[in-house]
């Protein structure tokens, strides 16, 4: 064989390895307010450029600028700030609890709080989210009790799921939070199917699917896009691009598409990219997509450009595959600090009030933890009944399951 005939395999490489200098020069960031806000009924082919840009509202000075600004009042923004701060404090306490052996597993949201907290405020009661394991902000922003979340994490006697789910895999029909699946990407097809069923029933509720950048390589992701585009399902297809899967940089799953949002273009789905660390931008884009769904204009795909500051989970050591200082170099900043700066600029907040709120929120989280631990933790206190293993599987328990339950002493 000649050299020209020899094949070689291309393996994508991250821009920098541990010990190197963080480099985000490949992240092309549009100026705040520079990206147009199209009409809600725009055709997908007319906004192809939005799949390659990044919609931003907050500029470097903390001002809200451009056509996507002005959707939220000061009171709504203060609520959003508090929700993000609560999620961050909740994370800190639960991570500590895992290190203390009170639960087996935990996953943080550090740096991604704006994505789920702002998105939830763009939905209506009764809409259904099909989340991954890093959207607890959907529950926090909807007023779901932290104690119930902690009970589930500890798998104690008051666990609303009776110990039948891994920690942090919450479920609440009342709060529009479909049961989290540990098998990645399954929730995408489930969300599209739920949205189709809602349309078949002539209901008014829409669905939201959630997936991480790594899981877009799964076949379920592509199957969901086929059905969503074919049947114009009333669904919002969310991709949280936090730059890293558990140990693989986002370039592996993205392939040659340039951006994750661009994946939607091949299916005729309107696709947008948004600054995932900008609470105002996330809300505005989510509201735009929700209106499309409610007006029978079909699905919208949204890529949230953000950064996972912490480890993938308590089972992960990110220092093995990325520089320790990489999060400090992330050009889109911290979502909590950016919204705080904006509110101070509007004279609706202050450093003193922020410090006070941090202390108050941490006190609330600690008190919730104290009450949850009263019902038990992983190695101490009350546990769900073994009987619960056999319940909730069949509408009517078949004889062989009943016999198994009896053998177990129940």
Image (spheres, rainbow, N blue to C red):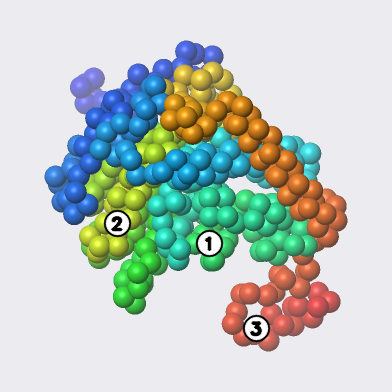
> Which badge, 3 or 2, comes first in the chain's sequence?
2
Pointer 3 local density, CA inside 10 Å: few below 14, some 14–19, many at least 20? few
Pointer 2 local density, CA inside 10 Å: few below 14, some 14–19, many at least 20? some
Marks 2 and 1 in Cβ contact (< 8 Å): no
Residue marked by disc 2? 291
> Which badge, 2 or 1, comes first in the chain's sequence?
1
Depth check, mark 1 against mark 3: the one in front is 1
Q: Which element type, helix, strand or loop, lies under badge 2?
A: helix
Q: Residue at x 14, y 45 (%)?
A: 46
Location of residue 299 (image quadrant): bottom left
Q: Position of residue 72 (x, y in %)?
A: 39, 44
Q: Which element type, helix, strand or loop, lies under badge 3?
A: loop
Q: Position of residue 253 (x, y in %)?
A: 38, 39
Q: Position of residue 389 (x, y in %)?
A: 71, 70
Any part of residue 95 in sight: no
Q: CA distance from mark 1 to mark 3?
A: 28 Å
The dot on residue 175 is: 1
Q: Which element type, helix, strand or loop, lies under badge 1?
A: loop
Q: Residue at x 24, y 30 (%)?
A: 34
The dot on residue 380 is: none
Foreground of the two, 189 or 155: 155
């Amino acid at each position: 064989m000649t050299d020209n005939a020899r094949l070689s395999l291309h393996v994508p490489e991250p821009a920098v390895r541990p010990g190197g200098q963080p480099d985000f020069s490949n992240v092309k960031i549009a100026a705040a307010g520079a990206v147009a806000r199209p009409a809600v009924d725009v055709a997908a082919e007319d906004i192809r450029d939005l799949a390659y840009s990044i919609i931003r509202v907050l500029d470097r000075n903390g001002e809200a600028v451009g056509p996507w600004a002005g959707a939220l009042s000061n009171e709504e923004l203060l609520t959003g700030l508090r929700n993000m701060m609560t999620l961050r404090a909740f994370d800190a306490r639960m991570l500590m609890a895992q290190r203390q052996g009170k639960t087996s597993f935990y996953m943080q949201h550090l740096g991604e709080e704006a994505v789920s907290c702002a998105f939830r405020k763009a939905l209506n009661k009764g809409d259904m989210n099909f989340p991954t394991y890093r959207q607890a902000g959907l529950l926090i922003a909807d007023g779901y009790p932290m104690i119930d979340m902690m009970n589930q994490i500890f798998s104690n006697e008051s666990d609303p799921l009776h110990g039948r789910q891994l920690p942090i895999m919450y479920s609440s029909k009342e709060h529009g939070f479909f049961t989290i699946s540990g098998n990645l990407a399954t929730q995408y097809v489930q969300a599209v199917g739920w949205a189709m069923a809602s349309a078949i029933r002539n209901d008014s509720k829409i669905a939201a699917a959630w997936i991480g950048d790594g899981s877009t390589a799964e076949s379920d992701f592509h199957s969901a896009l086929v059905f969503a585009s074919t049947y114009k399902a009333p669904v919002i297809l969310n991709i949280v691009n936090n730059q890293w899967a558990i140990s693989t940089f986002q370039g592996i799953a993205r392939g040659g598409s340039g951006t994750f949002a661009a994946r939607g273009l091949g299916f005729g789905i309107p696709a947008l990219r948004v600054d995932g660390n900008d609470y105002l931008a996330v809300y505005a884009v989510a509201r735009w997509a929700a209106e499309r769904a409610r007006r029978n204009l079909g699905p919208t795909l949204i890529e949230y450009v953000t950064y996972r500051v912490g480890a993938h989970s308590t089972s992960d050591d990110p220092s093995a595959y990325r520089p320790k200082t990489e999060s400090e170099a992330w050009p889109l900043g911290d979502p909590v600090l950016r919204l705080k700066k904006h509110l101070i600029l509007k004279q609706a907040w202050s450093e003193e009030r922020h410090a006070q709120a941090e202390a108050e929120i941490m006190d609330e989280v600690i008190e919730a933890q104290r009450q949850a631990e009263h019902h038990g933790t992983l190695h101490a206190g009350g546990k769900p009944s073994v009987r619960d293993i056999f319940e909730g599987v069949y509408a009517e328990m078949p004889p062989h399951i009943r016999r198994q339950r009896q053998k177990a002493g129940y």
